Image (spheres, rainbow, N blue to C red):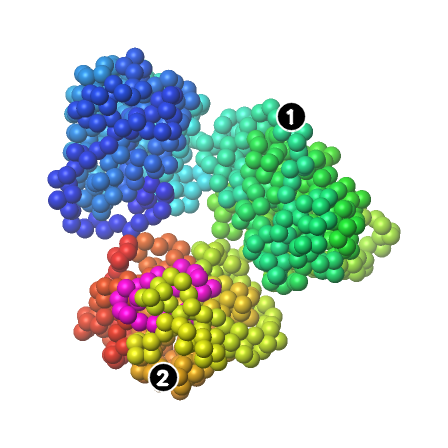
Amino acid sequence: MPDGDGKPHLVDLHEPADEIAIARNGANNQYWLYTRQNPTNAQVLVNGNANSVANSNYRANRGLKVIVHGWNSNGNTAMNPLITSAFLAVQDVNVIVVDWRALANSNYITATNGVPSVGQFLGNFLVWLINTAGGNWNNVHLVGFSLGAHVVGNAGRQASGRPARVTGLDPAGPNWGGNSNALNGNAGQYVEAIHTDGGLLGIFDRIAHADFYPNGGRNPQPGCWISTCSHGRAPELFASSVRTNHFVGRLCSNLQQAQNVQCTGGTFNMGNGIISKRGNGIFGLQTVCAGSAIPIVPGDNSHYVEGESRYVWMPDGDGKPHLVDLHEPADEEAIARNGANNQYWLFTRQNPNNAQIIVNGNANSIRNSNYRANRGLKVIVHGWNSNGNSGMNPLITSAFLAVQDVNVIVVDWRGLANSNYVTASNGVPGIGQHLGNFLVWLINTGGGNWNNVHLVGFSLGAHVVGNAGRQASGRPARVTGLDPAGPGWGGNSNALNRNAGQYVEAIHTDGGRLGIFDRIADGDFYPNGGRNPQPGCSNSDCSHGRAPDLFASSVRTNHFVGRQCSNIQQAQNNQCTGSALNMGNGKWNLWTTHWIQLAFLMNKWMLGARAFKILCAASVLKDPVQGYKEGDRYFYFPGDGDDTLHLVDAEDPVDFSFIEKFTRNPGNNGYWLFTRANPTAAQVIGFGDVDSVINSNIDFSKDSVFLAHGWNGNGGNEMNKVLTEAFLQNGDVNVIVLDWSTLANRGYTTAKSGTAAVGQGLGQFVNWLVSLGMSYEKVHLVGFSLGGHLVGNAGRETEGKVKRITALDPAGPLWGSDNNRVVATDAQYVEVIHTNTGLLGFTDPCGDADFYPNGGSGMPGCWLNSCSHGRAFEYMASSVKYNHLLANECDTLRDATRDRCTGELNHMGNADLSKSRSGIFRVNTERNYPY
């Protein structure tokens, strides 16, 4: 069942209700008033307090709209401002949002059982409000979503059915079948239900005067692939209908017709805010609208036709969709300011995260920076409604710096990019021309070589770099357009084209919608056909955003091999069999490579005939939710600390020279000490530096816990913070965090191959501390993911003398037959907690005690493998604090996965250094902390 943010939670429908919470019920309701005078800042109306109404913007001569959220939500949950703003946009009304979080945020059964009382209190409040401050029941409209639909049903009945309208948005289904407290036709003069996930999270049966079944009333709704999304479509459809009243239903003879979208009867509009609306029957409709109709599903641009559609969903820099009106007038004043407001942020390996600002025309800003003329220059330009900090910029910047010692300049043009889409589009040429002039000045003033310049732009940014390259007379060695923006750019002479650089490449991922589908560059790549949906995407916004993801991955690994296509149809259908050319990457000499690889295909290819286009379709990528299977070449693996899935090529060459250089001195790693005297500010212990030990808070008489992060992590990431806090809360110990981020942030194959050597270095560090007075009997090594195998190697370096090792879901990919993986002999006692077996984590028992919480995969509250993988350190932290996770011993691993364990109990996790039991164990956890 989703919460108010759409995040799914596992609900046990047999969980006992909390009768104490139910007893508090509706007395805790809050009533938040919004009007056109205060559209975003609530005024709280207090039941029984007439002054709270008198001092508010409530007006009796206005209509009254009441909105009620569902389970695990509150008055600030997204559906409330969505519907509130829609009502206020079209009507001068009072809108009251009911916040019943006090009960709604209990377990689902408790919240369900408390719904009647919450609704009755709401009904009594409305009676009091109208009697005290005035109003007209014929102008009252109650709207509730999910459990909230049943709340407004009870409220309407408590008010003797006087509300003019009651609208139930996909009324909650679980435990409501045959329930007399459910929404029904007695709640108001006209009761309407909109069913979007019928038979699953919502009720499918008729329950109102008019029951609407958009798109059949079941999952999946357009743009959705899971039930929680379809359930949440109901408020979105309703809010859209309030603004535009464009959903025309057809009367159906029966439910079967509605489900099959085969209704042909009389018309009746779904939703809207018309208070006098009346009707009866079953109605079906489709919500996929073409032409100029306003699309209602955020991110779904299936309606869009270039040159015809007026509205389109366009994502901002965080991937959040915004509805764009392509007929909106441009702000000419903003365009006039254009590129003069550009900012240019320099990143290098000396400052990979903290920008140095280069000011156009200010030579000192170059001299005082880390810019070096003998390095290559990469320039990155974001798209609409974004800025220099938007996710694509650090993603691509870090990829370039990981593989090349280059100057990276991120262009921040938010001054215009954050205008409306039409204004931003019209200003693109000026932005690009200013960028081109800046680059000419930079190279003339600070030095550099045009043959080492690579411009990269996403969406509108692709057209920016096109204009910049042309302003620089086509001198940049490479220009890469990442799904160049489509809306408003068909036939536009200012669009990216092959004149922008010596070699121009376009990567099309949402062609024909948010991106251009036509050939516009020297090399046009169409991964997975170049259209929506890209793997792992369910809507156009996601597919559009795949272009920067694919490009950043290609820079690190150069693993996307395209095949030349005879025509664009072949590319779209993934039927290309011609010569190979890699998509993306960060190389400068692709034009030469292009010539060599294709010359033999063209008998009459004349020197300088750059009009020739390459059409390449890259290999189909794996869906991120599928995880890893032994033998996969490509798989997604989460970064420990960045909460992001990264595409891994198992055949990516290992940088052995870097591993050898980095690991030959264990002092290259960071060793950060935390104690109760310094719980958050690290003291750095230098390997071999006795003074750093003497001058620290370390106490060898106390237990010492060593923490090792995983791939793409660092000493300051979440797992280290939560485990450090847990261990220090539980006991007065030394916590030493290992920071091996320099190697951990290389490609997965390199980081994995270097794990053993880093672990050996940690073991040597422990041996050195023991020589200074620490005892192996007081040492506990804890590692997550790759860090799980790392601490195994550390223990092995001490000849298994350390007291305890805990490996938290040790990484699975590429470890199946690796002798460097964690094993039971690495310490006196080795414990392993498996939370994502067979996918991101290692499956087989490999310690003295192997725990398989919830069977070892699919952790409660998780629906992504990365979430289940990360549960390992969360369970560990919780167990250290509370020591409450009791597991039954299992006869076999099969029994553990099938929940057939009835053996003696054993504590999972905790900080106990005296643990010794061996075997296979299972514990079933809760979905939320402390689990």
Give, as a three-letter code, the residue at label 1: Glu
Label 2: few (<14), some (14–19) or many (≥20) C-alpha neighbours in 10 Å: few
Q: Amino acid at mark 2?
A: Gly
Query: Start and end of the magenta stretch?
Result: 714-738
Q: Residue at x 58, y 58 (%)?
A: 352
The residue positioned farthest toward the top in the image shown: 61
Q: Secondary structure at mark 2?
A: loop
Which of disc 2 and disc 1 is earlier in sequence? 1
Whether residue 804 is visible? no
For label 1, the residue is 332
Q: Which residue is mark 2?
A: 773
Total numbered badges shown on the rendered structure: 2
Q: Quadrant of residue 785?
A: bottom left
| Quadrant into which the C terminus falls | bottom left
Q: Is residue 662 above or below residue 359?
A: below
Examine the image and state in which quarter residue 208 appears.
Answer: top left
Query: Can you tell which quarter of the image residue 531 is in?
Result: top right
Task: Using residue 179 as the reference point, say whether residue 755 is left or right of it.
Answer: right
Q: Could you tell me residue 175's position as x and y percent?
A: 21, 42
Relative to the observer, which residue lies in front, 835 or 915? 915
Residue 144 image point, x, y percent? 29, 31
Q: CA distance from mark 1 to mark 2?
A: 73 Å
- Label of residue 545 in the image: none
Quarter containing the N terminus = top left
Q: Are marks 1 and 2 in contact (CB under 8 Å)?
A: no
Horizontally, residue 112 falls left or right of residue 432, namely: left
- At horizontal 38% and vertical 40% (from top left) the residue drawn is 230
Left or right of residue 262, residue 877 in this image = left
